[in-house]
Image: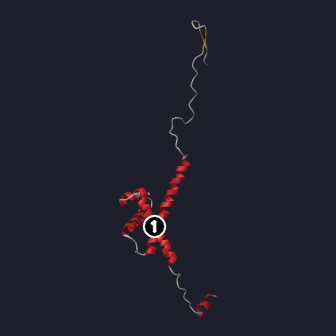
Amino acid sequence: MTVATIDPAAGHDTAPAPEPAPAAAGSGRKRHRYPTGWAAANEQRIKAATVTSAENVSRALEVLDGNIAPHVLEAARLRIDQPGLALSALARMAGCTKDVLAGRLRRLVKAAERAEQEAPPPAIQWAGPEALATAI
């Protein structure tokens, strides 16, 4: 408890400076911009996206069956071989920028989607009435 004192030379009461407020619990810790739950959720989302990207690229290589430019094939192999790496790390390995690598992968997947749409449907073979009778 603080007590005010009287300063006889000044002729009035002098109050001491107010005491600082007590420190809040957990003060002194660095505050994160986002709650840690969001950071963990973002990490999981990024990892899932990289795995999905690797699967899409792998499927595109199957569909296009070797009809791929060498620089695009290199980008595809890097993504498949290193599914957990970020695009920036893959781009450094490929010797290009992240945007260039992402564009190559995106064009590869789009080309495979177009090839699948343009491909004729698989032929249906008629097995004859014997096969129909055994299926029933």
Vertical arrangement, residue 26 with respect to residue 71, above or below: above
Is residue 89 something that shows in the picture? yes
Q: Give the x, y percent position of residue 49.
A: 50, 60
**Residue at the (48%, 64%) spot, across then down:** 53
| Quadrant of the image occupied by residue 132 | bottom right
- Seen in the picture, residue 66 relative to 95 is either above or below; the reply is below
For label 1, the SS is helix
Q: Check the picture and name the quadrant holding the N terminus.
A: top right
Q: Is residue 59 visible?
A: no
* Residue furthest left in the image: 95
Observer-nearest of 71 and 62: 71
**Depth check: 10 or 84 in front?**
10
Residue 123: where, in percent of width, then height?
53, 85
Q: Residue at x 42, y 63 (%)?
A: 79
Tell me if 26 is positioned left or right of 68 in this view.
right
Residue drawn at x 45%, y 68% is 108
**In the depicted structure, whether residue 72 falls above or below residue 135:** above
Residue 124 percent coordinates (x, y)? 55, 86
Q: Which residue is mark 1?
A: 107
